[in-house]
Every structure is written in C-alpha cells, then in structure tokens.
Image (cartoon, rainbow, N blue to C red):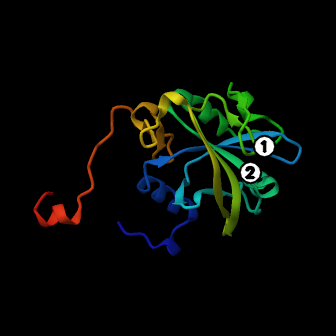
Amino acid sequence: MEFEIGKITARETYNLLIGLVAPRPIALVTSMDEDGRLNAAPFSAYNYVCIDPPVVALGVTDRPGGEYVPKDTARNIRRTGEFVVNVVTEDIAKQMNICATDFPPEVDEVAMAGLSAAPSKMVKVPRILEAHAALECREHCTIEIGRSRVILGRVVSIYIEDQFFDPAGPYVKAEELHAIGRMNGLGSYVKTRDSFLTMPRISYEAWKKGER
C-alpha cells in the first residue's frame, strides 16, 4: 500500500506514523500553571535533538475538536517556560497511564496516580519522586505547526538515581533502568528488559580490512 498524505485524514496519518516510528521513548512531563498547580502527562512524540546545548523536542497536539486549544502541558510551558521530563520505567508504567487520563485542569494527575512530587534542582517545576531519572528543562522555543506544537526544551539539569549511574563514562546503566517505549496507538508498549542488542560501530579502517 502507498498513501499520499494529502488524500488521507490526519487520524489515518497518525495511525500509520505511530505504527512505523516505533518504539518511541516516553516523556512523562510535569509542568505547572501560573498559580503553581501541578500537571503530569505522558508524550511519546519526544526525543533529544542536540547535545551542545542539550535540547529535547516534545510534540504536543491541540485538544480534540474544531478549536485550536492547547493541552495543559503546552499552555503551562508557554506561560512559565519550564518543565521536567520524567523517564518512564516498568515500575511506574501503570501510573504513567493514569496520568494520560483527560482530567480537568484543576486536577493533580500526580496525586491521582499515587505518585509524589520532589523538588527539582534548577527549575520550579518538581520532578516525580518515583521516577529514577529526570531532565529539568527550560523552554527554548515553541513552534506552532498546524494543530500541533513542537516544544524545544533546553536541558539545564539531569537527575539519575545513584544505582543507575556509572561514573566511568559517565554512563547510564540502561540495561538496569528498564525504560519502556511506546508502539502503536492501541495501548501497546515495549519493554527493554533483557532485550539489549550490542552492535559496535565499524570504523572505516576496519571496513576496508573486511571486518564487518
């Protein structure tokens, strides 16, 4: 099958893209409104895009319907300029899914999911205590594209629990962290536990020697 994007609906495009661009890391984003109310929501349109300076990108669609109404996360980040990406691992997967519920703006998703807030180091927005790693971010810019917003956040501090940190690199002990990824839009996820594949990069010199 071949699909011309101009001849299918946005929903059909979404269904196809999320089935092919996978697995995707999950950002459980905490943000706050101007009155200090905490919000938490997961997004899998997420990744890092550069490292000097360190910047992550977050894709946030508008609320469903005919109006161009931003979701709480996008609105909070635009107004306060700060957010935290909490890494989603197996042990908080169910709580992450609860945070995906479309609660009213005044409801604290962190509390609804049975999670706790912990102070961040560089931003006012708290991280999630139960998350083993988190990226504290300040908004670099927000790009409005159609019914979506691409938020670029500059990482200003990184939190990692000591048990998942290897000072030799420094490295993250990703094989022990057990992060999960998002697959298609049918509630499908993938585990990283016992699934790592090591494939060292081949240098050009090794390639010329036939070492492949």
Tell me where residue 141 sits by quadrant: bottom right
User: Does residue 144 appear to the left or right of 104 in the view shown?
Assistant: left
**Quarter of the image where the C terminus is located:** bottom left
Question: Which residue is at 77% across, 34% downward?
Answer: 108
Q: Is residue 191 visible?
A: no
Say which amino acid is labelled 1. Lys
Residue 135 percent location from the top left of the image = 61, 45
Q: Gap between marks 1 and 2, in whole Å?
A: 7 Å
Question: Which of the pair 110/70 is nearer the observer?
Answer: 110
Q: Is residue 135 above or below residue 204?
A: above
Residue 170 percent location from the top left of the image = 46, 42
Question: Which residue is at 55% across, 37% downward?
Answer: 88
Q: Is residue 128 visible?
A: yes
Checking the image for residue 82, the label placed there is: 2
User: Does residue 9 appear to the left or right of 144 in the view shown?
Assistant: left
Neighbour tally class for label 2: few under 14, some 14-19, many 20 plus, Cα within 10 Å: many
**Quarter of the image where the N terminus is located:** bottom left
Kindly identify which residue carries mark 1.
Answer: 124
Answer whether labels 1 and 2 touch (C-beta < 8 Å).
yes
Q: Residue furthest right?
A: 35
